[in-house]
Amino acid sequence: MATIAERGLDGLTMAGLGREVGMSSGHLLYYFRTKDELLLRTLEWSEGRLGAERSALLSRPAGARERLDAYVDLYVPDGHRDPHWTLWLEVWNRSQNADEDARARQAAIEGAWHRDLVALLAEGISRGEFRAVDPDRYAARLRALLDGFSVHVAVGIPGTGRPQVLAHVAEFIADSLIP
C-alpha cells in the first residue's frame, strides 16, 4: 500500500514490488495472477483493518452524533496521497474493466461502510438525536458527499484539505440531521 501511495500505479511494477518485499515477480503473480488482483486484495486487507477500527468506534458508549463524527473522521483521508485513498482511487480507476467478481468484492467493501452508517443513523433517529430521515437515503447522500470531498483531499486539490472538508461535513450534518 505504501509503495502504491508513494509511486502510484504507473510507478508500480511487479518486479519492483517483488524486490521491495523480497519475492520474485513470478512469485507475486503466482499468488495474485494480475496487478488488478494484487490491488484489490491489498484494498480488501486495508478495508479489513479499517472495518475493525470502524466497528470499535461505532460500538463505543457514546452518543450517535459523537460516533457519527468519528465515522466521518475515519472516512476522510489524512491528506494528499493518503495510502488507503490512493489505493481506492487506483482500484476505482480500473473498475470500468473489472470482472463481475471484482465488482462484487468492491460492492461488499462499500456495503459494509453503508450498512454501518445506516445502523448508526437509525439508532440516532430512534433516540431523538437525529431528525426523522430515511437512514438509507441519507447514508447514500452523506457517503457521496464524503467520497467527493475525500477524492479532493487525496489528490491534493487546493482549498480542500482535511480540516476544511471536516468543517463542511460537520456543517452539512448540523443543517440536515440535527433537530
Image (cartoon, rainbow, N blue to C red):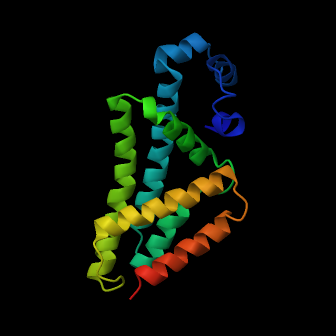
Name which residue lies at 58% across and 73% down.
168
Q: Residue furthest top?
A: 26
Residue 120, above or below 39: below
Q: Position of residue 97 (x, y in %)?
A: 44, 29
Q: Is residue 19 left or right of residue 84?
A: right
Q: Is residue 84 among the parts visible in the rendering?
A: yes
Q: Is residue 76 among the parts visible in the rendering?
A: no
Q: Position of residue 159 (x, y in %)?
A: 71, 65
Look at the image and tell me in which quarter the N terminus lies: top right
Look at the image and tell me in which quarter the C terminus lies: bottom left
Q: Residue furthest bottom?
A: 179
- How many marks do you count on the picture? 0
Name which residue lies at 56% across and 43% down.
89
Q: Residue furthest front?
A: 96
Name which residue lies at 50% across and 72% down.
69
Q: Position of residue 35 (x, y in %)?
A: 53, 23
Q: Position of residue 11 (x, y in %)?
A: 70, 28
Name which residue lies at 40% across and 75% down.
61
Residue 51, above or below 67: above
Q: Quadrant of residue 118?
A: bottom left
Q: Is residue 134 left or right of residue 179?
A: left
